[in-house]
Amino acid sequence: MERFKDTREDIYSFQNEFLVRCPFCDSCAILRCIDPDQVDRLAPRRFSCTACGSSKDWSKQKIESWYSRPGDDYLGYPLWLETSCCGDTLWAYNLRHLEFIEAFVRAKLRERKPHEIHGWSNKSLFSRLPKWIQSGKNREEIIKAIAKISESVVTPT
C-alpha cells in the first residue's frame, strides 16, 4: 500500500523555482532565485528562457498576486505545468511540487500528525489541497494528467 506522510511543507516551500510559459516564444522557461542560498520570498528572481534567450530580473519588495489564474507570484507568467483535469485546473509550480501532488494522490493511506507547538493547523500543503485532488475517485484521472504535463517538460537550465 502506498503511504503519504505529511512533511508540513506549505505552498511557499515550492516557490524557489517556477516553470513558466515564456511570453516571447511560448516555450518552457524558468523563474528562480538568483542566489540559490537565499530562498526568501522576496529574494531577487531571474526569468530565463533557453529557447529564445529572453531574460528578466525581478527585485521588488512587494509580491503581486495573480488570483484570477495560476501563475508565478513575481512576473505573473502562466505556469507551464498546468492542464484541465476533473473539471478544474491541475497546476504545479515546478517538478518537485508536481511530485508532491502525485505522491499524495497515489497514496491510499495519508498520514498527518499534529505539530508539536501549533497542534492541528491546516497551513501545510497536505491539508490545503482542493477536495477534488483529495478525492480517491479522481485518482486515475489526476495521475494521467500529471503524466501528461510531466512529459511536456524540457528542463530549462
Image: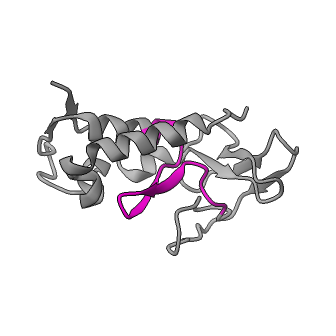
Left or right: 126 in relation to 145: left
Residue at 28% across, 50% down? 124
Q: Position of residue 14 (x, y in %)?
A: 47, 45
Which of these two is toward me, 13 or 92?
92
- Identified at 52% across, 53% down, the residue is 82
Which quarter of the figure has residue 103?
A: top left
Look at the picture and state if 151 lies above or below 1.
Answer: below
Q: From the viewer's perspective, is residue 23 above or below residue 44?
A: below
Give the side of residue 72 with respect to residue 7, left or right: right
Query: Which of the two residues, 89 or 38, is positioned nearer the viewer here?
Result: 89
Q: Is residue 49 magenta?
A: no
The chosen color scheme is one colour
Residue 83: x percent and y percent? 50, 54
Q: Look at the picture and state if 141 lies above or below 129.
A: above
Q: Residue furthest top?
A: 1
Give the mark count: 0
Q: Quadrant of the N terminus?
A: top left
Instruction: Write down the region rendered in magenta.
Output: 77-98
Residue sticking out furthest to the right:
53
Q: Position of residue 149 (x, y in %)?
A: 53, 42
Residue 9 shows up from this direction: no
Quarter assignment of residue 60: bottom right
Residue at 86%, 49% in the rendered image: 54
Assign the C terminus to one quadrant of the image: top right
Q: Which residue is at a point 59% across and 56% down the rendered structure image? A: 42
On the question of residue 109 being in view, the answer is yes
Tell me if residue 95 is in the magenta stretch.
yes
Q: Say whether residue 46 is left or right of residue 80.
A: right
Residue 127: x %, y % from top left:
23, 53
